[in-house]
Image (spheres, rainbow, N blue to C red):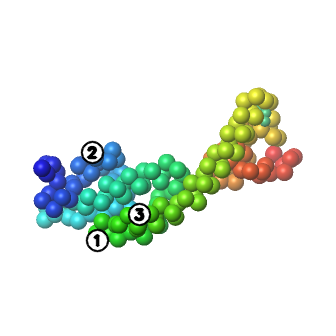
Amino acid sequence: MLGAMTDRDGRLAIGELAARSGVAPSALRYYEELGLIHSERTAGNQRRYPRTALRRVAFVRAAQQVGLSLEEVRAALDRLPVDRAPSATEWNAVARTWQRRIEDRIAELERLKERLTGCIGCGCLSLRKCGLYNPHDAAGKHGPGARYLMEEDDPEPAGTR
Ligand code: FES
């Protein structure tokens, strides 16, 4: 039986896609703006999403959890057809594109774990060497996030901070 917000072609209204995916309508509109999902319009100018949008939204959410940017997600999803449901082979090809990214993220978290464990045992909060203590955000120029914890080597030579 069709849901109240599903049309006879099985396409979903934005409210139903939001309810089923757990993603707010405003976020779904943003995803659409970015080209991550696609809709058609009814005669009354309402969005209708193909059922494959559910899988695309799930992919976006999972990809963000492992640290992929929306730009990276779009590059991956651009490999899929928009006029039909992607095959399992096509989805597998997309999944392979982010395996390397996940491996890098795991390595990054391993380094973070080691340094954080060291700091918890140490407690010195040294301006020169501590990855936790960085009051003037000298690490900011190296990029977002806890740079001293994330980077493999100290980003600045001793004495420059
Ligand atoms: S608390 Fe000593 S190095 Fe971080």
The residue wearing badge 2 is 19
C-alpha gap between disc 2 and disc 1: 23 Å
Q: Pick the quarter of the image with the C terminus.
A: top right
Q: Earlier in the sequence, mark 2 or mark 3?
A: 2
Helix, strand or loop status at disc 2: helix
Q: Left or right of 127: which side holds 80? A: left
Amino acid of disc 2: Ala
Residue 148 rendering spot, x and y as whole percentages: 72, 45
Q: Nearer the viewer, mark 1 or mark 3?
A: 3
- Nearer-the-camera pick, 147 or 101: 101
| Residue 125 visible in the snapshot | no
The residue wearing badge 3 is 91
Residue at left offset 76%, top offset 28% = 121
Total number of numbered discs in the rendering? 3
Q: Nearer the viewer, mark 2 or mark 3?
A: 3
For disc 2, the neighbor class at 10 Å (few under 14, some 14 to 19, many from 20) is few
The residue wearing badge 1 is 83
Helix, strand or loop status at disc 1: loop
Residue at left offset 55%, top offset 59% = 99
Q: Left or right of 160: which side holds 33? A: left
Q: Left or right of 119: which side holds 50? A: left
- Nearer-the-camera pick, 3 or 71: 3
Q: Nearer the viewer, mark 2 or mark 1?
A: 1
Residue 109 rendering spot, x and y as whole percentages: 64, 45
Q: Earlier in the sequence, mark 2 or mark 1?
A: 2
C-alpha gap between disc 1 and disc 3: 15 Å
Q: Quadrant of residue 7?
A: bottom left
Q: Quadrant of residue 40?
A: bottom left
Residue 155 rendering spot, x and y as whole percentages: 77, 52
